[in-house]
Amino acid sequence: MKYSTKELCLIWLDSFIGLEYKHKAELYKKLNNESKIKDFIQENKGYILEFIGENNYNTLLNSANGEYLNFVLEGLNKARVKAVTIDSEDYPEELKEIDIPPLVLYTIGNLELLKTKKFSIVGSRKNLPISLKIAEDYADKLCDAGLTLVTGIAEGVDKAVLLAGLKHERIISVVAGGFNCIYPKSNIDVFRKVCEKGLALSENPPDVNPMPYFFPVRNRIIAGLGIGTLVVSGTKKSGTMYTAEFAEEYGKDLFCIPYSVGVKSGEGPNELIKKGALLTDAPKDIIDFYNLEVKERKIELTKEEREVVAVIGEGLTHIEQIAQKTKKSAAELLATLSMLEIKGVVVKDGVNSYSIIKDNLEE
């Protein structure tokens, strides 16, 4: 991938994990117009030593060469990552308006999604089953209305939103660590699908392990990208509430699902509603709020998917019945059925049994 001199400077500087954000930002202001970084570092040794210390200074000086920069770029290429710096054309304008905007966004996937109208959806890892259905329904309807969804990569609400957004190929997942260190590992397959059909973002280089404090810091990006944020669930002390706080701080619209008294995962949304967040109990609330138009979209199916749907439509719902009718192995069918679930066409009723839930399929 080709980068400008300014982009290369920032990619090089951001690779030093031990440097604090404020130090990188300050150094970049000084280095921005410098073509000979090593000379600059040597000539300004006293100034640089004052705020990053001798060890970090020596690391910078010893790494101010083409060999080290090529090593960094090779690591990005190997991970299929494109670095989008705050000076890059693809850098989202929304993030330039927040406090502490990421200096570099590490990305895999469709960068064009950053230019679309985006909306954030967040919630708990542990939820009532109905909360996950609510998250999926909102995500599906908001995508139909033309919004690109922004969320994290956790279990629970994040995953429900990711699966819904993947059907429309309108999903952005913001992760806390590097792409080679996805947490939780149980969602690696979903993450890979996001890289193929949506966009994955991180402000950390690929090999950085996610530290606990990365998650609340990451949430400022989720809140910053969206025109608004929907809080589906969360306790009063949760990462979800951090995202809500960032949304309020940035002047974004904040929507919350209401809950009955005594529901632990509903305490956060109820508290936010008391403080002035917008109560929503249907996707139409958000669609109407932004004057969006819902366009009915035919769901595209492959030949194999259409064949499986036709068999289920005949009443053969168990995987063994489907296998016998289609003359395919269970392994082949599981891959097809999994994709049909992602597209929202079928739902798993029980142990290896399926039913159709969507009829707006392509002819």
Image: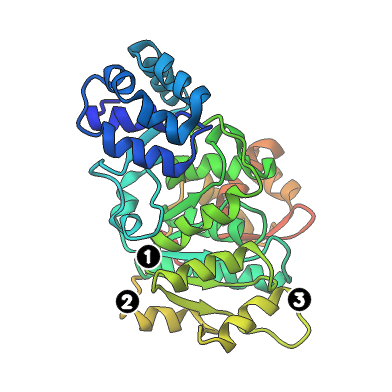
Location of mark 3 (residue): 264
* Tag 2: amino acid: Leu
Can residue 283 be seen from the camera position used here? yes
Location of mark 1 (residue): 147
Q: On screen, 362 above or below 245?
A: above
Q: Quick one: SS at disc 3?
A: helix
Q: Residue furthest top?
A: 67
- Tell me whether the residue at label 1 lies in contact with that at label 3, contact meaning CB atoms closer than 8 angstroms: no
* Tag 1: amino acid: Leu
- Tell me whether the residue at label 2 lies in contact with that at label 1, contact meaning CB atoms closer than 8 angstroms: yes
| Side of 331 where 137 appears, left or right | left
- Tell me whether the residue at label 2 lies in contact with that at label 3, contact meaning CB atoms closer than 8 angstroms: no
Classify mark 1: residues with Cα within 10 Å, few (<14), some (14-19) or many (20+).
many
- Picture quadrant where residue 235 is located: bottom right
Q: Position of residue 45 (x, y in %)?
A: 36, 23
- Viewer-side label of 1, 3: 3
* Residue at the image point whose x is 52% and y is 84% from the top: 280
Kindly identify which numbered label has been placed on residue 262: none
Q: Nearer the viewer, residue 146 or 89?
A: 89
Q: Quick one: SS at disc 2?
A: loop
Quadrant where the N terminus is found in the figure: top left
Can residue 357 be seen from the camera position used here? no
Kindly identify which numbered label has been placed on residue 292: 2
- Mark-to-mark CA distance, 2 and 3: 33 Å
Q: Position of residue 148 (x, y in %)?
A: 39, 60
* Residue at the image point whose x is 75% and y is 52% from the top: 352
Q: Nearer the viewer, residue 117 or 235?
A: 235
Question: If you read the primary sequence from the N terminus, does the residue marked by circle 1 or circle 3 appear first?
Answer: 1
* Tag 3: amino acid: Lys
Quadrant where the C terminus is found in the figure: bottom left
Number of numbered discs visible in the structure rendering: 3
- Picture quadrant where residue 197 is located: top left
